[in-house]
Amino acid sequence: MVIIMKPHTPKEEVVILKQRLQEENVEVNEWDGENFCVLGLIGDTTKIDESKIEANEYVERVHKVQQPYKLANRLFHPDNTVIEVEDQIIGGRDLTVIAGPCSVESEEQIVEIAKLVKKSGAGFLRGGAFKPRTSPYSFQGLKTHGLELLKIARQETGLPIVTEIMTADMIDRFVEDVDVIQVGARNMQNFELLKELGKTRKPILLKRGLSATIEELLMSAEYIMSEGNENVILCERGIRTFETYTRNTLDLSAIPAIKKLSHLPVIVDPSHAAGLWWMVEPLAKAAVAVGADGLIIEVHNDPANARCDGQQSIKPEKFDRLMEDINTLAQIGSRNIYETINI
Amino acid sequence: MVIIMKPHTPKEEVVILKQRLQEENVEVNEWDGENFCVLGLIGDTTKIDESKIEANEYVERVHKVQQPYKLANRLFHPDNTVIEVEDQIIGGRDLTVIAGPCSVESEEQIVEIAKLVKKSGAGFLRGGAFKPRTSPYSFQGLKTHGLELLKIARQETGLPIVTEIMTADMIDRFVEDVDVIQVGARNMQNFELLKELGKTRKPILLKRGLSATIEELLMSAEYIMSEGNENVILCERGIRTFETYTRNTLDLSAIPAIKKLSHLPVIVDPSHAAGLWWMVEPLAKAAVAVGADGLIIEVHNDPANARCDGQQSIKPEKFDRLMEDINTLAQIGSRNIYETINI
Amino acid sequence: MVIIMKPHTPKEEVVILKQRLQEENVEVNEWDGENFCVLGLIGDTTKIDESKIEANEYVERVHKVQQPYKLANRLFHPDNTVIEVEDQIIGGRDLTVIAGPCSVESEEQIVEIAKLVKKSGAGFLRGGAFKPRTSPYSFQGLKTHGLELLKIARQETGLPIVTEIMTADMIDRFVEDVDVIQVGARNMQNFELLKELGKTRKPILLKRGLSATIEELLMSAEYIMSEGNENVILCERGIRTFETYTRNTLDLSAIPAIKKLSHLPVIVDPSHAAGLWWMVEPLAKAAVAVGADGLIIEVHNDPANARCDGQQSIKPEKFDRLMEDINTLAQIGSRNIYETINI
Amino acid sequence: MVIIMKPHTPKEEVVILKQRLQEENVEVNEWDGENFCVLGLIGDTTKIDESKIEANEYVERVHKVQQPYKLANRLFHPDNTVIEVEDQIIGGRDLTVIAGPCSVESEEQIVEIAKLVKKSGAGFLRGGAFKPRTSPYSFQGLKTHGLELLKIARQETGLPIVTEIMTADMIDRFVEDVDVIQVGARNMQNFELLKELGKTRKPILLKRGLSATIEELLMSAEYIMSEGNENVILCERGIRTFETYTRNTLDLSAIPAIKKLSHLPVIVDPSHAAGLWWMVEPLAKAAVAVGADGLIIEVHNDPANARCDGQQSIKPEKFDRLMEDINTLAQIGSRNIYETINI
């Protein structure tokens, strides 16, 4: 941690601050420049509360040296985390593809789509049972009945299922019924939910919040991991920017950034990113080329009658063609990002 | 709702879409321009799902005419909502000031600060018992013990208390112990929590999410109101932008916008907005001048030793001087925004 | 154009507005909903000034139906624009790669780099002679001497040269000396410069401004084209967002968007987007996969001693390996975005 | 300057970097933490190019200690800069109000508005002669004829005139004809124009770019000042964010920030910020309350027929009432921000 004092800070105030810092068992170095005095802290600074230091009226700014996350940090865990779910592997050599409708609508719908995406090569089935919607008047999902339908689709196809949890009181049910538990973008900083999920051992698919920095995403992973659950899969799904042509702006630079900062697997959601079905294909390809560990894609057999997000769902035939292209892309080895970015 | 069809859409596709729309009991008007065909819908379009229409591959864009919120909409409720809590009124002629520390730390601390802010004229005491923190390693609040200490401070001063809820399972306790229940920015779209709070009749202080649009804030208020609780107070607390000098960017234009769109009271949090104690004063004054119904301000007797957010807390003496200035500002009548903005 | 009137607008005010609009030779349709009256305009609305209509105090909102650009619009020019420069083609079947240092530093430096990037397969040499720098104290480029050195490098390698113009008074010199004239992000809305460049017939590489929408970028292209110069190449180079890990956020969804909206070629600058040399490779691959027509990449033989932007420049060996990967990617046909996105 | 080295950087690479830094006449301190080695530089670091250091592949991050601007920095110039124009003072005790139409349309129009705003108490007349417009098909201003009409209005009222320059070749004419030369938001980083304006001694009104940070605004002021012209007035006019209800988001926290960082006067443009005439009044009041040195407001006698930006112009009667309120606000001393924010 580096502390920059305000110009003209009285000598005695620097002494007082240094003493206070030394009480926290860190070594304090001081440099005196022409206008600014700088304090550099060595030792375990993770217990030092930045905001307390910034509250000191003689402090101009505080810069962190060490990242505030440890368990999610590649520095202390150089090897990639690989997560096994049934016969599928996430974060390994092969690309993981999760596909399915925005929401589960009926047994017929979910089973049909499950069969189609499996045939095209998807490794997981997605489908929302509990749906977070901006409007209280929109379809909120089939809830527990939706979970039952997902289980039927799993039985019919063998595909493990991924679905979103919205409240901590459903955790036991999800642990029993579901293979990968998704935390949606709007709940990325629902810290109580994260802590409870940390007490399970289920793989958690943690989506980046619309306006969350990469560091905040990793801090949310840290919440889950600090309770003992290390099976965290990160997901980039677009951030909120000034551009309105797309619903969000897919931040593909987050993929190499996360690969460098963390050992956790990271996948991309091209459907929510743009909110436009015709952009799913090019963005999915770009995600593979940039080095993502996988994709989560919305596929619907009748988008124009989907009960939610039809505008960003692609049809099974289009998904089938996309999977072919993705396989070719993956084969030319463009996934080896981590090796590349390390010196 | 206005639907713009893609150029060169076959005539029969327009006919199919029109028929489908008419089945939803709306009247459909069609205009044929040189390049675009436009459909205009008249009637109750709130039940029509935009995303379904956008999923139609011949649709270029959809524009809403009517706002998607009803209960929060000034159009259907022209008079200001006024909320009474004990002897305090929020949304009326007088400015509401809520003050207190970021987090409750001890009986001594909270009682002392409560007495001081009361003396300066604050109408409510704030203080966090459950604290949402970016890091799992930061102080998470005194939790239920914090609620007990807030109740002691209320008993000592008579000030009603405002504190943040993080999970639905605490609602009964909060309803019993607390006067105004705060929903933090990170939970603004925790829809399950909002729905449960909607079943109580407690005043809810709903903070705008870091990257929430004004419309999304009003939709979250609608979630609470649609369950029967109309006692919603909105709060602008800064949005996330590219500027990094301040922690967030206070969006004061949201105040006249909300006053125009909605009848709900709206207050401003200048402490979280900038995250800098020395900006609280100018931003608080600006908030009053722009027409906010009140302020929520972090006050701490020893910011440099506060257990959280000391860098944005002001000392009681500074708060006292600020209250004097605010009173003068309020008296010159700059609050009458609503009358001004209507023709 | 669709005009939504305020609720409760007096009938006579609607009549007055309709008359005024009809004077501009457009047909005006009216729909009367329960709360809102909507006017729909048919005909050539490009001459109607939106801001005048919005200035009417009874107007709630105005939505455009037609894009405000014509010459850059794919609607009126369905085929891709293909630009020929010497033996190079931009916007055709093959990918265009422009490479070279941030700034021209010496004859030795620019000639050496030119030879190296040519050997790796680059089709154009880039190099800044006039440098827009945030600080007046930073190196501002070798200016006209830099142009002379670029010409020497062209002579030695045969590579056409691309370099940035900063003022209209240099246009004659650039037309004479340079093969593609670059307009930097900070000058994207320097409309006087755009108009003057529109009077030449040189290919113009127009970079998207840091906070320009896709529509604004196309409007700036329209400025150049409306003066007669249709040789415009667009360039996505990252937009400003709240994320600070990367200098800017590369918006790859802009590529399929621009391909859909416009017939102009569009390339990607992965160097400026992230501002991090180790991200150039993954982002360049993603750009090819998403369907860009080309890349512009900063290559320097000694980044740590580069006179500017060394932190985002890659070394010639790295560029060489990257070109191999890009060739493989391009061959698997991931470029065929335009055919894909059209129904 | 503080340099954080990558974890596991070889000792000899640190030594090489230190030697290179010492050659630039700065003292280099080294701290070795458990994972990171940190270098702290003392001395004049303004000549050290950050990007060169970041190009070193062993460097993780670089933090500046000193602001990169000197002439605009309050640290080296503690007293407020006060600029005199005729009998008006900008940056002094009194508030400066600049008012007038978006663009000069006719002699009758500009003279009438000038007389009205003068009567209400404005100190300067604004009016665009050269207009930067997003579309090449929009009205581009009366150009030099507009300058002539402004001069007539000045002669009739005695009000000094403020108008925008777009190209360096007009500087001589502007110096002769105009009292304050405005640089628009889109030209804030047109560095060549800034340098040329720096060679004059005319007061320059420098508007913040739509996506410019406060530091970048001050660096642009530094460009003008480094050429010798210290008469720079800054202007906050709204930044680009994700919120679309208002055209831009007025960043009023920029005012106390600039007052702390710089000695230059700073005014606010509430008209362009929101782009909505009915928000001008509340935002103008907030700007005065937050401590701005002045306001620039668009006033038009017939907004619905204005040739540009009618939607954000207020009528003279509204301006007159606003001036009364602003006078009251200013009198209660809310301008004393600078004294407040200093310890």
Image: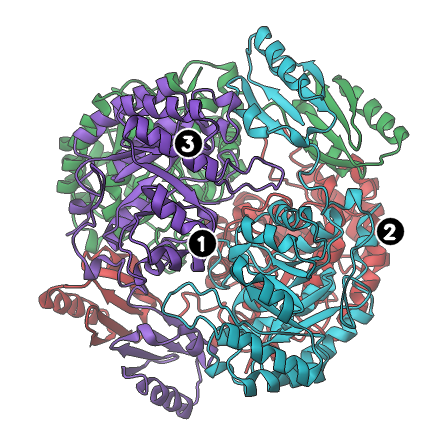
Chain colours: A purple, B cyan, C green, D red
Q: Which quarter of the rendered picture does the C terminus of chain B lie within? A: top right
How crowded pointer 1 is (Cα within 10 Å; few <14, some 14-19, many 20+) is rated as: some
**x, y percent for residue A3:** 36, 76
Measured in 3D between alpha carbons, the distance from the residue under mark 2 to the one under mark 3, in whole angstroms, is 66 Å
Q: Chain of mark 1?
A: A
Measured in 3D between alpha carbons, the distance from the residue under mark 3 to the one under mark 1, in whole angstroms, is 21 Å
Return the residue nearer the eye: C168 or A204.
A204
- The residue to which callout 2 is attached is D317
- Position of residue B303 in the picture relative to residue C142 (left or right): right
Vertical position of residue C13 compared to residue A66: above or below:
above
- Position of residue A340 in the picture relative to residue B299 (left or right): left
* Residue pictured at 59% horizontal, 7% vertical: B11
Q: Amino acid at mark 1?
A: Ala
Answer yes or no: is residue C125 visible.
no
> SS of the residue at dot 2?
helix
Q: Quadrant of residue B54?
A: top right
Vertical position of residue B131 compared to residue A306: above or below:
below
